[in-house]
Image (tube, helix red, strand yellow):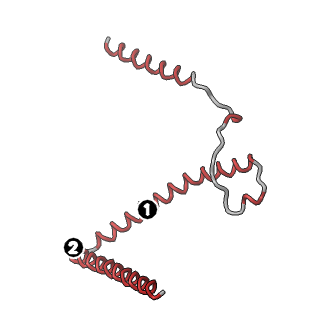
Amino acid sequence: MTRVRCALFVLGLALLAVTSTSGQDKKGDKDDPKVKGTLPAHWKDLGLSDDQKQKVYKIQANYKGKIDELEKKIKDLKTEEHEERMKVLTDDQKKKLREILLGESKDKDKDKDKDKDKDKAKDKDK
């Protein structure tokens, strides 16, 4: 008996969901909102119609999603590659690598400071 009640309850919820979504207004192709975007360089000079611009914007939006997915996949693969490489190293090698990388970043910071000092000296000379 409880199974029948549960089945009827689920069926009622499904009917309620279907009727609530079927009452929503459906927009036709004529009512599609205009897509905003930017045209590629020099395309403004071509005298495109509004329809052509909209088509270009839709194409760009479509490919942007695909490109974003691929860029995320590339980033994930690079991370995975790095992790795999790190598994090859011993703990001592990992420690030495960290020291080397930290030393390089400190050297870069020192070079930046030297460049700033040179720029300040040039400004004083003027």
Label 2: which secondary element: helix
Q: Where is residue 84 in the image (x, y as percent from the top left)?
A: 33, 67
Residue in the picture at 69% in, 47% down = 54
Amino acid type, callout 1: Lys
User: Furthest residue to the bottom?
Assistant: 125
| Residue at mark 1 to residue at mark 2: CA–CA distance | 25 Å
Q: Is residue 114 above or below residue 24?
A: below
- Closer to the observer: label 1 or label 2? 1
**Camera-side residue of 89 and 56:** 56
Q: Which quarter of the figure is the N terminus placed in?
A: top left
Q: Where is residue 82 in the image (x, y as percent from the top left)?
A: 36, 68
Residue in the picture at 76% in, 60% down = 45
Q: Please indicate whether residue 111 sits to the left or right of residue 14 in the image.
A: left
Other residues around mark 2 within 10 Å, as few (<14) / some (14–19) / many (≥20) = few
Q: Which mark is residue 91?
A: 2
Other residues around mark 1 within 10 Å, as few (<14) / some (14–19) / many (≥20) = few
Residue denoted by label 1: 75
Residue in the picture at 38% in, 64% down = 79
